[in-house]
Amino acid sequence: MTKKAAKKIRYTVVGAGHGGKAMAAHLAIMGFEVVLYNRNPDHISAIQRRGGIDLEPEDRGPQGFGKLKLATSDMGAALKNADVIMVVLPSSAHVDIATAAAPHLKDGQIVVLNPGRTCGALEFYQTMRAHGCTADVTIAEAETLIYASRSDGPAQARIFRIKEAVPLAAFPATRTQSVLDALEGAYPQFIDGVNVLHTGLNNMGAIFHPALTVLNAGRIESTHGDYEFYIEGVTPSVARVLEVLDRERVTVASALGIRARTAMEWLQQAYNSTGADLLEAIHNQQGYHGIKAPSTVNHRYVTEDVPMSLVPIASFGTRYGVSVRGMDAMIRMASFMHRTDYWHRGRTLDKLNLGQMSVSELTHFVSEGPEN
């Protein structure tokens, strides 16, 4: 796809939080036609009055006024003319968005989950089909959100950094290149993520976020998060638990024929941070210094990352004969803390209609899609 053709891509951004506002403004500043959707009209009223979003100055980030085509709480209006639909919401909202979008999706549209966490694209596909959508829509997921950003006000956002390389995979994987081609004019940073099993099992937030929150629950509640999350919160004992969880994730991936990056490899690739062990590598990551802990344990690091990340990875392990006792313990402790059952609420293979598939059948499914 030429850059001239790419400029004609019409984007709809679903979600007007930190990432969604930043993405909508940035796309508009780059010259794309952008529609912003948020289900709560009050949340976008200031954007509607302004006609767009101010991207505030930041040393390494883009800036300017992003004029939007439309800001709306009407899903039908939001999707009507979209070529690419960028969902920028916590993964716990994917089912609701797929349900609301199902009647309005059309042949040829691309939905990108930013990010999908683990099995996000598969859950979105199953949900839209369950709600009667028969359109030929391509669902894709990014391994992580491309922006480090913040919402500075009702119609303001700030981008601190744009990641240099973000793996992305489509479902089925045979469509990944066409998605990358469509996005290239705006996001050349997206690269081939192989398939949605690769992007989902390289989900590092599944390892770091829940464990650091659960194991530091007492400190979070007593200080309201007034300590350095990754530095003071990662003690030798906590780091050893992280290493166990990471080994389980890598072993689950191996059982599916995937060579997943270890946490140590990820820290080196993403931040050039090394060490003798995970404790040292985390403490050597200068970007972690100064980051405070969540102010409460009722935070997306648990409410999102446990059911949408840990549960599906552990579910793969249980199905394919890998011991996931560490993950199971973390899921159960989080469930006790929040008086809920994250195993029941989470993305299990049975919920995704994958429970009876062999490894080869699963690999074929994510690569080629469902049989017609």
Image: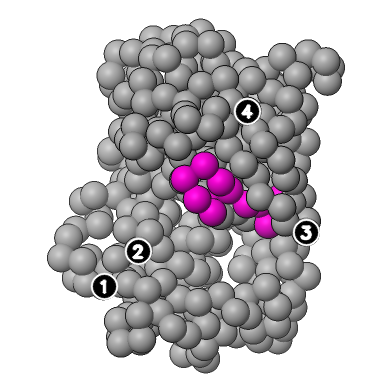
Which residue in the structure is indicated by mark 1?
Answer: 333
**Secondary structure beneath label 4:** strand
In primary-sequence order, the first of circles 3 and 2 is 3
At x 74%, y 75%, the residue is: 273
In what quadrant of the picture does the N terminus appear?
A: top right
**Secondary structure beneath label 3:** loop
Going by the numbered disc 3, the residue's amino acid type is Asp
Going by the numbered disc 4, the residue's amino acid type is Lys
Disc 3 and disc 2: Cα gap in Å? 29 Å
Disc 3 and disc 4: Cα gap in Å? 22 Å
Give residue 29's position: percent from left, percent from top: 71, 33
Counting other residues with Cα less than 10 Å from the Cα at mark 4, is it few (<14), some (14-19), or many (20 or more)? Answer: many
Foreground mark, 3 or 2, reads 3
Give residue 232's position: percent from left, percent from top: 52, 88
Which residue in the structure is indicated by mark 3?
Answer: 59
In primary-sequence order, the first of circles 3 and 1 is 3
At x 60%, y 79%, the residue is: 290
In primary-sequence order, the first of circles 2 and 1 is 2
Which range is magenta? 151-162
Disc 3 and disc 1: Cα gap in Å? 41 Å
